[in-house]
Image (cartoon, rainbow, N blue to C red):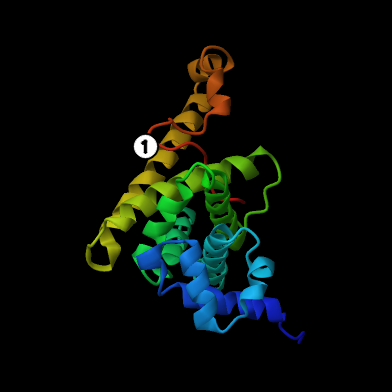
Amino acid sequence: MEPENPLNSARVAVIDAALAHVPFDGWSPATLKAALADSGVPPGLAAALFPRGPLDLALAYHQQGDARMVQALAGMDLATLRFRDRIAAAVMARLDLVEDKELVRRGTTFFALPQNAAEGARAVWGTADAIWRALGDTSEDVNWYTKRATLAAVYSATVLYWLGDDSPGHENTRDFLDRRIDGVMQFEKFKAGLRDNPLGKALLAGPLKIFDHIRAPRTPDDLPGSLKDPA
């Protein structure tokens, strides 16, 4: 077994220490400074651990959550579930690993800032990619992108709903997530039906050819992309 990288250990220690401060100070320089002090990590290491300060601290926390989710999924028996239910289980597993909703609430505010928006979108894409990989996706064509774009949109909408959900066991969030996935799946069935119908084939070859580039209606309730089984 290879010895653990001291910088990785220090990074984890700072992240863990930051969690007590984020609900009060957000993902901010004040939180990073306090986390360094609480963890005992020398302030001089801050630039090496988090070159962009609070931005890299917040991203490291998010990525740590993705890694923990992948570990959790590896220990779950998902083989008997429909693929859409595996996706839902993965999304809920990711949310259930959050120590405190305020950490995510502060994160959504932080990543909504114009200077952080691109990194926030990249982080959500990373979560979608981690889920698909954990579920065995091996696609390499355009489906690789559409699957992740779709799941990223579904995941983002679900997170926002989850932040305001106080139902037991987040049952309402699970119902919301199921409806989002249903919207995607229904659109995929609609497209498949058109392809199997002579008139539909004619339409798809002409006025409805745009469907080849659209995986679902672009509305809050019917999100773009495909959540099909990767097989």
Please name the amino acid that badge 1 sits on.
Pro
The one nearer the camera, 139 or 170, is 170
Q: How many marks?
A: 1
20 on left or right of 72: left
Give percent across and percent down for residue 104. 40, 60
Label 1 Cα crowd, 10 Å radius (few <14 / some 14-19 / many 20+)? few
- Residue at 56 percent across and 60 percent down: it is 59
As rendered, which of 89 and 197 lies closer to the eye?
A: 89
- The residue at which mark 1 appears reads as 220
- Up the image or down, 35 lies above or below 149; here it is below
Q: Residue at x 38, y 32 (%)?
A: 219
Q: Quadrant of the N terminus?
A: bottom right
79 left or right, relative to 85: right
Residue 208 in view here:
yes
Q: Is residue 227 visible?
A: no
Tell me the element at label 1. Answer: loop
Q: Residue at x 69, y 77 (%)?
A: 7
Return the x and y of residue 38 as percentages of the image width and height: 49, 82
> From what the image shows, is residue 61 above or below residue 172?
below
**Residue 159 x, y percent position in the rendering:** 38, 54
